[in-house]
């Protein structure tokens, strides 16, 4: 009988996989490289391996817990935990045994390798004109002619700040008497859109923060900004906890519309995760969540609908109409977001059914509509979004990339967090590999194995690995392993060929980190979807080649442009004209946070950009199959001539026939 | 040692008093005449005397319970209650013993005399132009050019209903996909102010209801209207549960600002009570609370602030500034009101610190500003509000009446509910009394005693009783009992004189219903406050007499205008020009509910009406003392010459000196 397995996902590392039922959460973390501290070696005595069990039942917007999917705590564990101020869903990883699918958070104090933020957002010059600003007002002693406290403040707002026609948010009104009393007539009013008083505080000590949030299918990123100066204070990221309910947007739609309470659950999960990011971000800079007075949010259309708790059903069927596509300002509290009670959340507009607000963010950040050069912008994510054009015309489309390029559905995949292999080089002569791990300054060949502690491989690492396997001749153009090569790096995993990127001694696991045949197939499927989408837009636009390519992605690490071209994820282009910009969608959200005019530009861009979809299904299939090859079955890549010379020389005879393994597990 | 006593208030009758600790709630109800069914005679076997314990701790906006103030249930009681679907705060009145102050609701099924609504609101002709209307829309099959579901609906709104520039409330947006699906393209949109879609439903079967609410310090009244036709569907009323935290507005302010959580508690209590009234009202007409799509609310300034959860502190100190005095539209859900999630609550404006939105309602209903006649309007309540003027000028002031005229702080006082004595006549020859009880068609002298079952006396009954005592010569102009009279109706209660209105056999109590010397004093204080306020406005306006007097009051029963004048609650006037209009404040709320233009008129009226306060404290005191006399120490009442002839003849020598009893208990 086949043993029962359960799916387990660790946050914040993103390490995920299936493990046999009955093993401890600590053991699962070891096998998957999630890095939990356990000084006593898992004896249940040191109490260091506290984790939070996070999946299943829900309390609106906050605690998410299902202790049913782990074994109940024994007396010894209870004794260790009872005197600490821990939530009810805290467990010792060494004691809790896996009895069902789990989402587990490893809190910072339990992480064996502390979480650091991989990348700050790009430095961009953004003209500062936020939707929220503060005004300090001095109010004289009240007299009967003043009418009311509200009128006193609105009169002061007109006289001292030149704001006429001001109105009070009801919640700010409730806070007004206390602020007047505590401030002895001096208060700071927080003003939204030069009109609505959304918050009042005593004195003049406070200033507002803003949070820009990019909601990816797999990864969430949040940027905390000082709205007075525009400074980016901190960047935080986490997995989207919705991943336990489906890896891609179609499965999220399916869960939301077929499961009772499904939509509400997905909404609640993502809001709770954003709340947690907001808490982390403000704590990191010594502020409180109440100081967050404005938010902007982007995400693909399904993430957008689930954030707003809107039925995503119509996004999944013809004619793919969203419930709303225009920008929307909602009170943050209406969404369950725990920031300032008066804060508004500005959700950027959608372009079309599957080209979302995240792509509008990319356009805001990259400004292709202000350039003459024909630019191809590829936002790599679980839902790939592609734009082509210039100041004359912008076309967009989407590509069902799947999560492989974000490290999911890859044997040792993880998101771009400490411990992730982000860069890979394979020597074409020796077939030996070296790599670089996030959190370490040097490459693996400059460090002793025990210092490496690699835990997995992230999106950028996977792209590089596949490109290097190709140029080293270890895999063919069709992606198949060349099993004739004599190197200890080439091993078999479950009977299928795999290449060892990191040897067991170099990892935090008890096994090597490998790229399997399935992993190569997953990357081929993902990159082919992007390539076909890009070629389709080029055909629509009427160009055989593009002037520039911009590679964007929320998955944390910058993509190596040459290797992205080597695997055929992007069409041929002068490599000097290919740039990799990191999370442009998040940058766009930050731009909209800091500049109100950009919110209007976003609305214009979303309507102006023309959404096109491949019309003939048969043609798409044919192009897709041709695009599975590395880099492509017949499209020329003159700019890669040198790099590809060696792989072209590889004998085709050494390939084996393969069956159904083409679809990743 | 003095035995411990606790305060207990029964809803919906309003019967209240202090009872010794340790007696059962049923016994307390008997002593106070609250009328609880108990077939088994209080043996704990019939299970009919279920009551809800309602005071103390709070769960936001809903259940209000404190089982600590009664003895815990024994096993026998538990067995009786356990199989019924009752809230946790349900108890058997015969088993629960009083151990603290209590607010007890006697649900309809436990009332020995069933609750009926005393009065419908006045019939008034109101032009129908509500803020909310419904539009049925037919949507064609979606296509890609429609952009989004929201745009489809807004386009249909423009084409089919002529509403351009429409916007969607976020909550209505969430309901849109389901409505489109269920209605197969036919939906009914609920539109607020011709602009905001606040609700969508499938098909064309629904129509909106509106609720107008008058929040009195002592009594709440709610009017459920059909917003399609303007019809008044039902009227419901209840005690304001805040009464357990203070009888008048000053004590409510004090509780709100000095007790931790006090303001929030008072807010929560009144919202929960309004929610309960809304439920009762819609259930009575077979509808659901979600059908209530619009609300208007009035109340005095303190009730207004507590409804909005605004700090009422500044209302209690110079310069008596409210936090807000203008009309305010708040989402009903922001206040905790459980009606349609998209519904707005329109709270009418205040005139000044102590002249509230309820008085604006009175002005809307009575329209003194459209008349040449100089009209005096007195809104009798725990906080009396007085207006004088005509189309030239309107003056207003407030009077600290106290709750006596609503039946509180009166020995057998209760609100105008079934069982209340509402009319009283005393034969000046025999000194015998007859009375009329709410819920019975005939006077007491036409009914056998066992059918009467009087439980107490309401405001209108008390005014009549005091007037009749005066004209019968039983009390003097100064309010003192004439103890020389030989009649069994004149008895002693705790050593002080009292007059028997209803003999024990005519009551549901085990004792007679009496008017004591303290009760007469309480009425004198209340009516003097009103009279002085009215005279002050007349002086400010520059008239010695008024052309018309309008008597309004939320306490349920119409005031007998002649007897109100006999006790000197109102100044002398041609009795044909005195009218009693019932709850004009509630009528005003209803007018604003049904007509948007009247909401604008209310804002104008609130600003136009001039608030005046007595300037010289010494003069006020002197006038107040003179006004304590019945009808007045020196002001002439030529229109009452005949009625007062007999009382004037009463010998002053029979009066006793009295001390501190002048202040009601």
Image: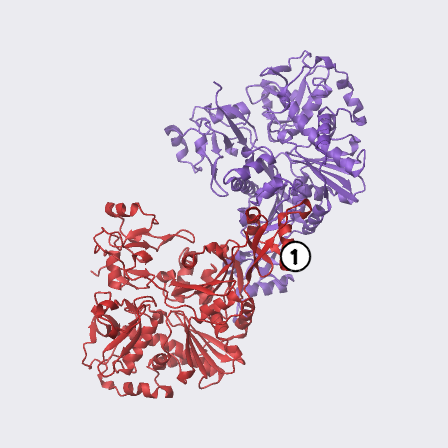
Chain colours: A purple, B red
Q: Is residue B377 above or below residue A270?
A: below
Q: Is residue B495 above or below residue B49?
A: below
Helix, strand, or loop for circle 1?
A: helix
* Residue A175 left/right relative to A125: left
Quadrant of the frame with the C terminus of chain B = bottom left
Total count of labels? 1
Quadrant of the frame with the N terminus of chain B = bottom left
Of A306 and B392, which appears nearest the observer?
A306
Q: Residue B509: which quarter of the image?
A: bottom left
Q: Give the x, y percent position of residue A443.
A: 66, 24
Q: Give the x, y percent position of residue A242.
A: 55, 36
Mark 1 surroundings within 10 Å by alpha-carbon count, few (fewer than 14), some (14 through 19), many (20 or more): few
Q: Give the x, y percent position of residue B404.
A: 34, 71
Say whether residue B524 is visible.
Answer: yes
Please give the residue where the numbered disc 1 appears in the rendered image: B159
Chain for disc number 1: B
Of B147 and A474, which appears nearest the observer?
B147
* Residue B49 left/right relative to A198: left
Q: In this view, does A319 lie above or below A17?
A: below
Q: In this view, does A2 lie above or below A329?
A: above
Say whether residue A126 is visible.
Answer: no
Q: Give the x, y percent position of residue A32.
A: 54, 25
């Amino acid at each position: 009988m086949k043993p029962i397995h359960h799916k387990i996902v660790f946050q914040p590392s993103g390490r995920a996989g299936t493990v046999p039922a009955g093993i401890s959460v600590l053991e699962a973390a070891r096998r998957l490289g999630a890095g939990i501290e356990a000084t006593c070696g898992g004896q249940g005595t040191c109490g260091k391996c506290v984790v939070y069990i996070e999946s299943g039942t829900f309390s609106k917007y906050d605690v998410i817990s299902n202790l049913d999917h782990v074994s109940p705590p024994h007396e010894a564990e209870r004794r260790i935990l009872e005197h600490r101020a821990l939530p009810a869903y805290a467990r010792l990883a060494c004691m809790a045994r896996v009895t069902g699918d789990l989402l587990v958070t490893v809190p910072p104090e339990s992480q064996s390798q502390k979480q650091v933020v991989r990348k700050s957002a790009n430095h961009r010059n953004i003209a500062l004109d936020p939707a929220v600003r503060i005004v300090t007002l001095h109010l004289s002693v009240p007299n009967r002619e003043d009418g009311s406290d509200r009128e006193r403040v609105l009169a002061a707002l007109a006289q001292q700040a030149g704001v006429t026609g001001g109105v009070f948010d009801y919640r700010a009104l409730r806070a007004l008497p206390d602020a007047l009393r505590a401030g002895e007539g001096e208060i700071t009013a927080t003003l939204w859109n030069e009109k609505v008083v959304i918050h009042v505080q005593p004195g003049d000590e406070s200033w507002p923060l803003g949070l820009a949030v990019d909601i990816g299918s797999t990864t969430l990123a949040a940027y905390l900004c000082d709205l007075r100066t525009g400074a980016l204070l901190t960047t935080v990221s986490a997995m989207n906890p919705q991943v336990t309910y489906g890896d891609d947007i179609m499965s999220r739609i399916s869960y939301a519309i077929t499961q009772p309470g499904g939509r509400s659950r997905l909404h609640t999960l993502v809001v709770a995760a954003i709340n947690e990011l907001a808490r982390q971000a403000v704590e990191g800079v010594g502020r409180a969540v109440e100081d967050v007075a404005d938010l902007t949010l982007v995400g693909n259309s399904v993430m957008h609908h689930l954030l707003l708790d809107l039925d995503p059903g119509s996004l999944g069927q013809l004619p793919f109409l969203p419930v709303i596509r225009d920008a929307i300002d909602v009170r943050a509290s209406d969404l369950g977001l725990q920031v300032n009670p008066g804060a508004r959340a500005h959700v950027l507009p959608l372009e079309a059914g599957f080209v979302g607000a995240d792509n509008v963010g990319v356009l805001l950040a990259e400004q292709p509509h202000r350039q003459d050069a024909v630019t191809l912008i590829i936002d790599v994510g679980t839902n790939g979004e592609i734009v082509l054009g210039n100041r004359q015309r912008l076309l967009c489309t989407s590509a069902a990339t799947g999560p492989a390029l974000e490290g999911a559905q890859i044997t040792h995949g993880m998101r771009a967090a400490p411990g992730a292999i982000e860069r890979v080089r394979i020597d074409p002569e020796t077939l030996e590999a070296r790599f670089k791990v996030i959190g370490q300054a040097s490459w693996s060949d400059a460090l002793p194995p025990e210092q490496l502690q690699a835990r997995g491989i992230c999106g950028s690492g996977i792209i590089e690995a596949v490109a290097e396997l190709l140029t080293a001749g270890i895999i063919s153009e069709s992606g198949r392993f060349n099993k004739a090569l004599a190197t200890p790096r080439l091993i078999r995993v479950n009977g299928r060929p795999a290449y060892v990127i990191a040897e067991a001694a170099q990892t935090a696991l008890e096994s090597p980190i490998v790229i399997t045949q399935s992993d190569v197939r997953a990357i081929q499927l993902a990159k082919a979807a992007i390539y076909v989408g890009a070629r389709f837009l080029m055909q629509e636009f009427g160009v055989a080649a593009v002037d520039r390519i911009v590679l964007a992605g929320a998955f944390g690490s910058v993509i190596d442009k040459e290797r992205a071209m080597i695997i055929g994820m992007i069409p041929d282009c002068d490599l000097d004209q290919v740039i990799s910009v990191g999370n442009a969608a998040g940058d766009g959200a930050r731009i909209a946070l800091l500049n109100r005019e950009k919110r209007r530009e976003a609305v214009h861009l979303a309507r102006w950009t023309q959404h096109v979809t491949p019309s003939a299904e048969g043609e798409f299939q044919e192009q897709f199959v041709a695009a599975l090859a590395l880099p492509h079955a017949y499209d020329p890549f003159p700019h890669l001539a040198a790099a590809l010379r060696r792989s072209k020389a590889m004998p085709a005879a050494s390939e084996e026939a393969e069956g159904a393994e083409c679809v990743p597990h």
